[in-house]
Image (cartoon, rainbow, N blue to C red):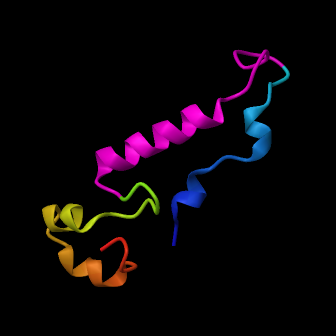
């Protein structure tokens, strides 16, 4: 399955590009990390693992799926 580690970019993504809007700089890794964390919160996912929290599963009426999540998330 996918985890929060799958929401990271390759190291080269944070450096400048050859042309375009990011030619003078690259993506800010901290800013991207904060954006991903905000997205996880908005989706009802755990910020550390990027997996749905029990409350979100219950909201979607699929709380039975919590038994398939790691204990620290459920």
Is 25 magenta? The answer is yes
Disc count in the image?
A: 0
Residue 20 figure quarter: top right
Q: Position of residue 11 (x, y in %)?
A: 77, 44
Farthest-out residue, front: 72
Residue that extends furthest to the bottom in the rendered view of this protein: 67
Residue drawn at x 48%, y 43% is 36
32 falls in the magenta region? yes
From what the image shows, is residue 31 above or below residue 37?
Answer: above
Q: As rendered, which of 66 and 18 lies closer to the eye?
A: 66
Q: Is residue 50 above or below residue 63?
A: above
Quadrant for residue 5, please give it.
bottom right
Where's residue 63, x and y in %?
A: 19, 75
Q: Residue furthest right?
A: 18
Can you give x and y, in whole percent of width and height, for residue 72 in the image?
Answer: 37, 74
Q: Is residue 47 above or below residue 55?
A: above
Quarter of the figure with residue 12: top right
Answer with left or right where residue 2 lies relative to residue 8: left
**Quadrant in the picture for the C terminus:** bottom left
Up-down: is 47 above or below 16? below
Q: Is residue 51 left or right of residue 9?
A: left
Residue 64 percent coordinates (x, y): 21, 81
Who's the residue at 38% across and 49% down the image?
40
Q: Which residues are magenta?
A: 19-45
Which residue is located at x 62 percent, y 50 percent? 8
């Amino acid at each position: 399955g996918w985890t929060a580690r799958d929401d990271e970019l390759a190291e080269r993504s944070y450096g400048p590009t050859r042309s375009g809007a990011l030619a003078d700089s690259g993506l800010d890794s901290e800013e991207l990390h904060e954006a991903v964390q905000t997205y996880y919160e908005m989706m009802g996912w755990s910020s550390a693992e990027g997996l749905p929290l029990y409350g979100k599963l219950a909201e979607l009426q699929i709380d039975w799926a919590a038994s398939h999540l790691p204990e620290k998330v459920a």
